[in-house]
Amino acid sequence: MFTRLTKTIGTLGLVGLLATAAHAENWRGWNIHSDGYPNTVAMDKFAELLEEKTGGEITLQMFHGGTLGNQPDGIEQVRIGGLEIGNFNLGPIGPIVPSANVVSLPFIFKDVDHMFRVLESEGGEAIAAGMAEKGLVPLSWFDAGARSFYSQKPINSPADVTGLKVRVMNNDLFTGMISALGGNPSPMAFGEVYQALKTGVVDGAENNWPSYESTGHFEVAGFYSLSQHLIIPECLCINTGTYEALSAEMKAAVKDAAQEAALLQRQLWKEREAASQEKVMAAGVQFNEISNKVPFQEAMASVYEAYLEANPDLRGLVELIQNTD
Ligand code: BDP
């Protein structure tokens, strides 16, 4: 009896060990971009580093190209824990997290470096805290350059936007922005924009050089006007509950992997921005610098007013960004 019990305990011990090994977590991650895009490469690198740094305790299967649904759905999935990981633009996160929406105010950042300086300051902490409360912990920040308008004619002043149907990401700040320029905003999923431009459902859209190129939008909207009206960061985000359930050691490993992936993304981003611009220009895209952006900036007063009216407590954050060098 005694021997049998010892044996049983021995077997249970082994089973216990196996159970621990099999207890490894398998995460799933959302990404909208196609193969070779800086974010896609960086997310694959993140998966690799995650496994390495957690000693195989955590693995991640990435789903690229928006195969797990459009961006608002992906955000919702990570928020509720249906998925653990996502690379998201803060544009469509803004409607859920008012503090994170500050980065979607047109012309709020002077340039990408200014944006990163803010993210690394207390401004970034306020944004991250707001996101974590709503289910999304940003583990690191990606570069998404500056977004500019493109259509079938050059845009040099707000008057050129008057009457144009322009696709925007889902966020009232962006519909407000187009309306303030006299255009007709059309919020739409990223994957639908090519057809919409091609069939004339919209006259124009706005994005950075790499997305303008990777989606083929340049084939159907051949004038790129350098308005650089939005400089919005992206996050490598994790579901808050998933992150909070980790040990301190695992949290550090996950965070490390995300930081390293972000450094890679930022480096690849710079290279891709130049390569994408070169590619579309070689394909015949006409590109114009906008010599005077002030009328565009001035037209945004109503967008800022609406944001501050809805979020009076965030005036300090807006001013902090405006006062950061
Ligand atoms: C790209 C972002 C992607 C957005 C897309 C869009 O990287 O997250 O979904 O723009 O315009 O630049 O929807």
Image (spheres, grey):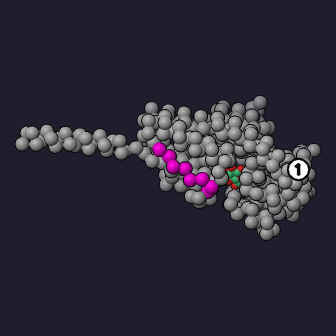
What is the three-letter code of the residue carrying label 1? Answer: Phe
Please count the marks in the image: 1
Secondary structure, mark 1, is: strand
Q: Is residue 273 above or below residue 259?
A: below
State the image quarter where residue 166 is shown.
bottom right
Q: Determine whether 292 is above or below 194 in the image.
A: above
Q: Residue at x 68, y 60 (%)?
A: 191
Seen at 58% across and 41% down, the residue is 45
Residue 291 rendering spot, x and y as whole percentages? 93, 44
Between 177 and 74, the one lying in front of the other is 74
- Name the residue nearer the viewer: 283 or 308: 283
What is the magenta range?
59-66
Query: Residue shown at 8%/39% (left/top)?
Result: 2
Residue identifier under label 1: 287
Indicate yes or no whether the magenta region holds residue 79: no
| Percent coordinates x, y for residue 248 in the rendering | 45, 33
Q: Main secondary structure of the magenta part?
A: strand
> If the image is split into quadrants, where does the C terminus sit?
top right
Percent across and percent down for residue 199 are 79, 69
Spot occupied by residue 255 in the image (x, y as percentages of width and height) = 54, 35
Q: Is residue 94 above or below residue 317?
A: below
